Image: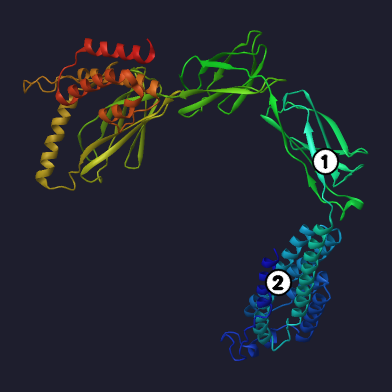
Amino acid sequence: MRLSASVMMVLLIALLYTPVAKASSDELPRHLNPEELSHELPSIPLLEDVFSKFVNSILVENFSEANLSLQVLARAYYPPNVKELADRFYSLLGNLTVELSEVKEDIELARSLLNELMLNESLIEVVEGFRDLAKANLTLINAEVTSIYLSKLLSGASLDVDPIHILLEDYYSDLESLYDEIQNAIEKYYEELKPVYLNVTVDKDKAWIGSSIIIEGYLTSLNETLSGRLVEIYVDGHSTFLQTDSNGYFRMAFGIPYVYKPYLLVYAIFMPRGLDVGVYSFARSNIVLVELLSLKTNITAYLSKRVALPGGKVSLRGKISLGDASLLIKAFDRCFTVRADENGFFNAEVEIPPNAQEGVYSVVVSFKGFKEWRPVATSLELIVIREPLYIDVVHPEVVLGGVPFDVEGRVMLNGSGVEGVTVEALYMDQVSTSLTDINGSFRVSLSFGLLCPTGTQYVILRAPPPYCWARGAQVKVAIFNVNVLMVSSLTAVVAVLLYLSLKKLRGEGLKRSVEGYELKEAMKEAEVKPREIGESFRGPSYYREAVSIVERHTGVSMEPSDTVREYLKKVSQKLGDAYALFKELSMKLEEQVYGGKSVDEAECNRILDELKRALEGA
């Protein structure tokens, strides 16, 4: 400790005697000419008088009076080019005043603690005083440099802060003297103090929560007992004072609270007071650990289902081995209590908030503890999902700029159409809307406009969730636009012929149906019977139903951008034995869509039923 303080003294001496850089009288900034600003300067004699009062107040340690003088100086008028430098100068002096007052307080407090023989605390204050003094010395050096420039701008006004160094040197001498006194007192104190012995015992090394223990002990010093002294007993962080009897003995009974901890920590402290200060040393007793005994109850709980929808309810049932116990249930940042019957059985309903986000949530069932029964808790996982909407869309592949066209489709949920959903079509910074009918069908009329360039344009269809437990859907479709005003004649003719052929196809009509869309005979003349769209969509409807089952079980949603194989890979680790069934149905879908094979309805139904039984037990 003495070595570190000595190093600090050397550093402080170096700071105190650091030479201040002297500025040459002809090194003024060119834009600050005192002769040009002399008619705007404050009264120099008055300024010097107030500044002299400030310095004198500092030297006599009247820091409040020094602050008043600084306020007068700061309120004086200065030309704009001088004011910034003046404000900095007075700000430095204000900081210096605060730092010097802190040094004075450190010295006074250290002296007071030394008189009370609080040697360690006194030494800490001395070190703090050296630190504050070093800060004040650096501030004074900066103020000296600033005063040189400011004096020249103020027509040579005398703003010398050098006398303040005298006070810093006095403070340094006081701190150095205090440090030596404390070191001598510490050496003398430990040489002259009589050692004190403090012993504590507890009648039990194990105790039940809520019971009592007896704490006793002796306070002695060499061959004498210390009677009538205060001993502070600490039990579990709480303290109690006991007075020793004529034999230095003390004793108390302590009632163990229902703290439900593994053990109690017991020890005692003796602090010399009054005439004992400087005679007897401080003493701390041995530490005694008392193991706490309590009864443990068990909670068994389960949810009626593992996956739930927002706005729904889940039944919670269970049993606690302590009958008629009060249980706290916490779920979705809400708490409520339920009381078990005399046999320990309990049941409750957990409500899922309508605004709950999809994810995994914890349902915690806890027992706070009662008498000798310790607290216990168990946690259950509840997966919240939303039923996904699907949008089937039929749209033209090619359109002519400026010619209206229709985009039709159907909004479905779990394979059925959803009525009353407002479908938005976003294209070219425009929005068109359509309300679905009883079958979930919709139609929006769009037009890319005459100025839309030739190329692929995108239309985004959005369907917001109609229920709190549903998830909205979005589909992005690409349509090729032909602008006949911006292409060559040949290209325009080709585009018109293409449009006429599309118009002929559309003349046959796109017809809505409950199952989807059907394209009527559009190629009779070519004697080619195309596969109907309704038939081609039958396979995907089986797949969508399978996806709904998988999403409910795994909580993993199929995004619009996911391919069949990508989604299969995402859920592969969560399906277990049902993975093979879902994979088989996915591969059949690929064969139908990409390979053009027909769908075996009986086979699809069989796979779907097995998947339901495997995942939902249906």
Task: In this rendered view, identify the residue nearer to me: 28 or 324.
Answer: 324
* In front: label 1 or label 2: 1
At label 1, the amino acid type is Glu
Q: Residues within 10 Å of mark 1 (few under 14, many from 20)?
A: some
Indicate left or right for 547 with 262 as reference: left
Say which quadrant the C terminus sits in: top left
Q: Which mark is residue 232?
A: 1
Q: Is residue 305 above or below residue 479?
A: above
Outermost residue, front direction?
223
Task: In this rendered view, identify the residue nearer to me: 244 or 574.
Answer: 244
Q: Residues within 10 Å of mark 2 (few under 14, many from 20)?
A: many
Q: Which mark is residue 136?
A: 2
Indicate left or right for 63 with 448 as reference: right
Say which quadrant the N terminus sits in: bottom right
Secondary structure beneath label 2: helix
Indicate left or right for 64 with 416 as reference: right
The residue lying at 14 percent from left, 32 percent from top is: 500
At label 2, the amino acid type is Ala
Task: In this rendered view, identify the residue nearer to me: 127 or 459.
Answer: 127
Could you tell which of marks 1 and 2 lies nearer the N-terminus? 2
Q: Position of residue 577 (x, y in %)?
A: 32, 18
**Which quadrant of the view contains residue 427?**
top left
Task: In this rendered view, identify the residue nearer to me: 149 or 239.
Answer: 239
Q: Is residue 311 above or below residue 319?
A: below
Q: Which mark is residue 27?
A: none
Secondary structure beneath label 1: strand
Residue 88, visible in the rendered structure = yes
Outermost residue, top direction?
343
C-alpha separation, residue under disc 1 versus residue under disc 2: 43 Å
Q: Position of residue 363 (x, y in %)?
A: 54, 23
**Which quadrant of the view contains residue 576?**
top left
